[in-house]
Image (spheres, helix red, strand yellow):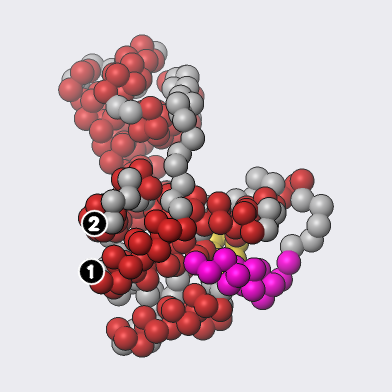
Amino acid sequence: MEITLKKLKHGTQEYLDVLAKKGLAGSTFNVYARNLAYMNGYFEHECGLHGITPEDVAEFRAHVEAKYKNATAINIIGITNRLFRFMHEERFCIRNIRKKQPERLPEVLTRAEYKKLLAAAAREDSKLYYIIRTVAGTGINYSDLEFITVDAVKNGYANAERSGKAWDIVISRNLQEVLSQYCRENGIKNGIIFYGRGMNRIIDRAYICRQLKILGGMVKIDESKLTMRALRLFFSYMYLQSENNIFELNELLGNKMYAARQILPSRSISEKSRTLAKLGL
């Protein structure tokens, strides 16, 4: 029971073509492409022209688990299994790596630290200042920055959709004013607000992460609190402190896992907007 390297590479390209048509965020697609290229390179080096067996895939799993951190290893093996299922080669799928529980809960940015971070960004990097305000004020992921457009700011919300999931990104009234000011200052009249090298592409993730670390170092904030995920966590923490409504928080975050258990109907966008404005983020 083998699969040739040629068939694996062909299947990989077909899978990537399908993913590209699904409209995945660019950063997500790049993760798939990078991990699948790594997998193909491994088998090309280890198996050469010989066929790849399920035992070879198991050895690949062990190699990945030994080389990479737990979260990265889980991602690589998960994507590998999804490829084999796409190719209808389920016999090559392997048991995924178990997720290790963190030794301690992640530290959350405090409001005082958030204010210090904003002050540093306002002095050193105005674009990052507005990005921090946007992520901390909405709870969005990096890839969701593509939904923050001039029209979304004017409307007070953005219709977001990805991988068959749709939700509303609520932009509070005070954040609308902040982002409108940014658009005026930078002459942005349509499309994505935080664009990168092209007007239709969002700003580079690496730039944001790098600048967050630099600014955080200036004001003595621990690096673990200086990521896009940490800002999203900060938003969630501030929201729950104020509202203590886990169902609505998951709606705001685009997480539908609680939908089936929700009893009360969702509030309107304007009501949610007023709630977010009270957070003062």
163 left or right, relative to 56:
right
- Give the residues in magenta: 267-281
Residue 21 in view of the camera: no
Which residue type carries mark 1? Glu
Q: Is residue 221 visible?
A: yes
Sort mark 1 into few (<14), some (14-19) or many (20+) by Cα contacts within 10 Å. Answer: some
Answer with the quarter of the image where residue 26 lies.
bottom left
Q: Where's residue 29, x and y in %? A: 36, 49
Residue 257, percent from left and from top: 65, 45
* Magenta stretch contains residue 280: yes
Q: Which residue is mark 2?
A: 218
Tell me whether the residue at label 2 lies in contact with that at label 1, contact meaning CB atoms closer than 8 angstroms.
yes
Residue shown at the point (33%, 28%) measured from the top left: 69
Element under disc 1? helix
| Residue 53 x %, y % | 34, 15
- Disc 1 marks which residue? 124
Question: Relative to 200, is 173 on the left or the right?
Answer: right
Residue at image coords 29%, 67%:
121
**Screen quadrant of the N terminus:** top left
Foreground label between 2 and 1: 2
Q: What's the residue type where badge 2 is placed?
A: Met
2 or 1: tag closer to the N-terminus: 1
Q: Is residue 30 left or right of residue 22?
A: left
In the rendered structure, does residue 41 fall within the stretch colored magenta? no
Residue 90, horizontal then vertical, whole percent: 49, 24
Residue count near mark 2 (Cα–Cα under 10 Å), binned few <14, some 14–19, many ≥20: few
Q: Residue at x 54, y 72 (%)?
A: 171
Mark 2 to mark 1 CA distance (whole Å): 10 Å
Is residue 114 depicted above or below 80 in this figure? below
Q: Residue at x 45, y 71 (%)?
A: 148
